[in-house]
Image (cartoon, rainbow, N blue to C red):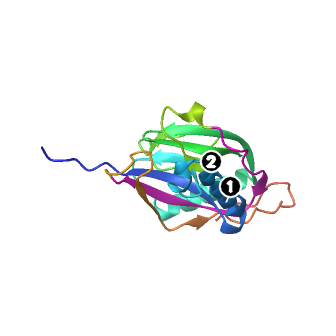
Amino acid sequence: MPCSKPKPVRFIALIPHRDSAAPLEAYRSRLFAAGARGAYSFPAAAPLAAVSRALLPEELKALACSLREANASIRLGAPSSCAYPPFVFWGPELEMAAPGITGGPDLVLWQHWPPVLCAALVPRGREGLFSPPPPPQGAFKAAMVANLIIRPLGQGDADYSFIWKIGSPVWLPSHPRRAAGGCFTPCG
């Protein structure tokens, strides 16, 4: 009987600038040392949505603008988890306004709000048994959005055995300055 290859999963992800992600990386190291085996199985990113296809560059740019117009900065909140099988993402919730994801009615397969900045993957069904140290606090402004594809390896520990690839990122524009009329200047 032939083995079927595990299907890849596509996400749109928000990725903090590496300078902003330094506290999360230090936290991931502490999580791994505390026994969270999934601390390095997923990039330091927040899955905004699972999608049926990769977003086109202009769709990513529109999403980046939508996020920036709604969020001057993004604050790290309380620890939380969210699941999109086979993944359970664990980390600080991101306190931010929801973006508008364009691309047609069949594009978004899943969305969890508020999103979780993934510090670790937790085995499904064992979320309540996970008792990590508290996540870092703070906020960040510099971030990008990108297509993210994850391919389960089909071997090894199924909870942690993945290959992931991040597509070409689109940076959130600098926060628009208030115009004379009190409106934000548009992205574009």
In the figure, residue 72 lies in which quadrant? bottom right
Q: In the image, which is nearer the foreground, mark 2 or mark 1?
A: 1
Disc 1 marks which residue? 27
In the image: residue 121, left or right of residue 74: left
Residue 107 locus on image (x, y percent): 43, 46
Nearest the camera: 166 or 61?
A: 166
Q: How many marks?
A: 2
Nearest the camera: 128 or 165?
A: 128
In the image: residue 124, left or right of residue 66: left
Residue 110 visible in the shown view: yes
Q: Tag 1's secondary structure? A: helix
Kind of residue indicated by mark 2: Pro
Which residue appears at 69% of the width and 60% of the height? Answer: 26
Which residue appears at 77% of the width and 55% of the height? Answer: 139
Q: Dot 1: few (<14), some (14–19), or many (≥20) neighbours within 10 Å? A: many
In the image: residue 60, left or right of residue 67: left
The residue range painted magenta reads: 131-153
Q: Which mark, by number, is residue 99?
A: 2
Q: Dot 2: few (<14), some (14–19), or many (≥20) neighbours within 10 Å? A: some
Nearest the camera: 94 or 172?
A: 94
Residue 137 locus on image (x, y percent): 78, 50
Nearest the camera: 69 or 38?
A: 38
Kind of residue indicated by mark 1: Tyr
Q: Is residue 157 magenta?
A: no
Q: Is residue 142 magenta?
A: yes
Which residue appears at 53% of the width and 50% of the height? Answer: 37
In the image: residue 159, left or right of residue 90: left
Of the numbered discs 2 and 1, the one sitting upstream in the chain is 1
| Measured Cα–Cα span from mark 2 to mark 1 | 27 Å
